Image (cartoon, rainbow, N blue to C red):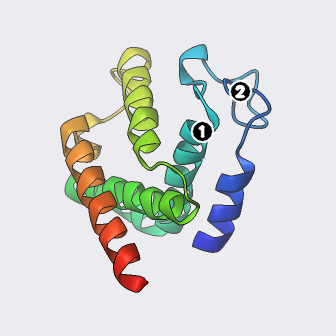
Amino acid sequence: MIVAGAALVRAATPARPTGDLPGLSGGLDRRLRARDAEELQAIVAHEIGHECVSSDYERASELEDHRRLKNLELLCDAIAIVTLQRLGKNPQRLMAGVEKMDRYNQRLSRSTVNRTNYPTLSERRAFAHDSATRCSYYRLSER
């Protein structure tokens, strides 16, 4: 799944750096457009993580297991970070995309997005930093 995901992330380079996700050009709000190719790739890598954990995510949603849902979000971040690093991309672009999605969700759907299902931005930043550091360490030790 990660190998196929990496191919999708590589393919997620828009013709224009501010392009929408393919197939959604008319449907995405302006605020969700990626600023550059790496930000779009980071968002796609995170969403591929959701595909990897979809059955766990559905089960946790059914059980209203907020702690598990938060952990699965962080796992999707980790999958994105590993994927981006393996492709030689900047994993810091993930947080730019996550922050953009968070701001969008706060403005658009205050009542429909259950904030208890998501880690806070500060939790995500700390987790992303720790994950990227560990991933870099393991990559160096493989050589």
Percent coordinates x, y for residue 39 in the rendering: 54, 37
The residue sitting at 30% across, 71% down in the picture is 137
Percent coordinates x, y for residue 26 in the rendering: 76, 21
The amino acid at mark 2 is Gly
Please identify the quarter of the rendering in which residue 135 is found.
bottom left
User: Taking 113 as reference, is 5 left or right?
Assistant: right
Task: State if disc 2 and disc 1 touch (CB < 8 Å).
Answer: yes
Residue corresponding to mark 2: 19
Percent coordinates x, y for residue 64 in the rendering: 27, 53
Give how far apart the Cα atoms at labels 1 and 2 are: 9 Å
Which of 13 and 24 lies nearest the eye of the viewer? 13
Quarter of the picture containing the N terminus is bottom right
Residue corresponding to mark 1: 40
User: Taking 78 as reference, is 123 left or right?
Assistant: left
The residue sitting at 69% across, 28% down in the picture is 20
The residue sitting at 70% across, 35% down in the picture is 21
The amino acid at mark 1 is Leu
Q: For numbered disc 2, what is the local secondary structure?
A: loop
The residue sitting at 37% across, 22% down in the picture is 103
Quarter of the picture containing the C terminus is bottom left
Tell me the crowding category of disc 1: few under 14, some 14 to 19, or many 20 or more residues within 10 angstroms, Cα based.
many
Counting residues from the start of the chain, the first of labels 1 and 2 encountered is: 2
Please identify the quarter of the rendering in which residue 62 is found.
bottom left
